[in-house]
Amino acid sequence: MADTVPQPPRAGRRQAGPPGEPRRIAYLYIAPALLVFGLFFLTPLLHAVWLSLYEWDGLSVGTWVGLDNYRLVLTDEALREPFVHALTLIVFFSIIPCALGLALASMITRSAVRGVNFFRTVLFLPQVVALVVVAVAWRQIFAPDGPLNDFLRTVGLGDVARGWLGDERYALICIGIVGIWVCTGLCVVLFLAGLSKVPRELYEAARLDGAGPIREFITISVPAVRGELAVALTLTLVAAMRTFDLVYVMTSGGPGTSSRVPAYEVWDRAINKGQVGVGVTVALILTAFILLCTVLINRLSESADS
Amino acid sequence: MTSRLERITTYALLIAASAFALYPMGLILFSALQPDSVGGTGAFHFDNFETAWRVGHFGRYMANSILVAVVVVVVSATLSSLAGYAFGTMKFRGSSALFYLLLLGLMVPSEAIVIPLYYDLRGLGLTDTYAALILPQIAQSLAFGVFWMRQYFRSVPPEIVEAARMDGAGHGRVLWSILLPMGRPAIITMVLLVLMWTWNEFLLPLVMLPTNEGLRTAPLGLSFFKGQYTEGTSLLAAGAVLVALPIVVFYIFAQRHFIRGMLEGSVKG
């Protein structure tokens, strides 16, 4: 490595010239990015706030309604329901995958599994496949004559078999199961990375003290991956709250309203039903909720560190 | 170290988890190779792919997706490298405020901007065009791209830049002939991730193409194909395989880049 190269006296050179002094040329380098970002991200974001204060069908002239849309979203039963569904999905997208991921990752690390790379690649695969494709695959699995019902009939549970996605009680849970499938691999891979930083001696010391696998898991593994846990929770929670593709392709929010989620509500209201103001307000409240969760999780993990 | 029983349990669970991860993909691949109508014989039927390609217009959809993805990747990678260079190596007034402004793009979900974007672009007569698919996705990719490239430029030892500047290289030269070639791994990771996100994007094309079926991207085409051919499971499956295949192939050959990028890129700030 380059550590034998004598260091130049940097302090002196800093004052003499580059790099260090404010550079006007920097603006030239960031201008194109800022321009595109400003036009196609920041402007629509501000426009969203503006639209949320209007009642507008997308065609005629809008009517100023102040904060009425916000009041409506927070009080109307039909508009609250998708948010409750999103909270349900968090259990499937975040909590179950994080728990499974922690257990699997610590077992892999403990047993020093061979071919970790192969398993990592396989388990992470669901993260790179387009969600529309994922939805098509799982629709087939849950279909009335699909593999899930075939399996149930084979093991003698034919009475339980049904069109899973057509059943009000199960449609949302089915979306949730796909969420487990999508998110678990991500969690395993994240936690593996965290656990690989734990020195092996720590485990050996714990074992000499007579700690079993459970003790070891709670006292060494979980604290070691605290940072990764915050990242995993953030990523999967955002994925749960933003679910759209899966719902659009698998259930279209149905049957009835049993699997409507906020992002679906945004699209349906603002594009199909001519309720642009309401749709945009749902989107902004969803955004606020996501930002709040992100900040909260990071705060918690930081305060736990210190 | 660990008992035999424990090791066997671990392997058994790992294999079960892997089977669970692979099963839906295997199922779709298997269905795609089944005869489309009852009564067909023979082992595997590759003609479903051909039918989906022609009858299902997947040839067209894939071409659209390739065009959109290539333009988004090239433009956003270029702009991200330029901006990341400034943010990572230069001091200037307002740099941190501007950087945090860009980071908003990582935090704010696209659901919040897609509706106003649709009405803005419709006002300009740009909906149902490639521009409506490409420009917003460049903007969204920039947040990650600038963040990622800034991180790379900051990791370069300042001595390297100083030495080049001593030799009389200007800012552009330093970037083009030293820092970008050195940063190839970081750039490849960014390119692959933006490629994947753009290829898989669904909500934006759904909203931006209210009438123009000819511009549909591959995932969007697949979702409409689903509605049309409810009875032909194997054709639908063949379409799904076509849509997923390019990214899965990239993933198989460069999985380190995908995993590294998604893990490091998400650890914000």
Image (cartoon, coloured by chain):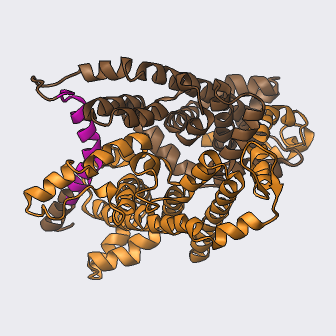
- Compared to A162, does B93 lie above or below? above
Chain in orange, by letter, is A
Q: Which residue occupies the foreground of this view, A249 or A137?
A: A249
Question: Which of the 4 quarters of the picture holds residue A31?
Answer: top right
- Asked if residue A32 shows in the view, the reply is yes
Question: Which of the 4 quarters of the picture holds residue B74?
Answer: top right
Residue B236 image offset from top left, x and y in percent: 32, 33
In the picture, measured across the screen, residue A124 lies left or right of residue A12, that is left
Q: Residue at x 49, y 34 (%)?
A: B220
Residue B261 image offset from top left, x and y in percent: 52, 44
Chain in brown, by letter, is B
Residue B20 image offset from top left, x and y in percent: 26, 52
Query: What's drawn in magenta, residue-wise?
Result: B13-37
Q: Quick check: is B21 in the magenta stretch?
A: yes
Q: Residue at x 81, y 62 (%)?
A: A65
Q: Main secondary structure of the magenta part?
A: helix
Which quadrant: the C terminus of chain A? bottom right
Residue A262 image offset from top left, x and y in percent: 56, 59
- Compared to B13, does B137 lie above or below? above
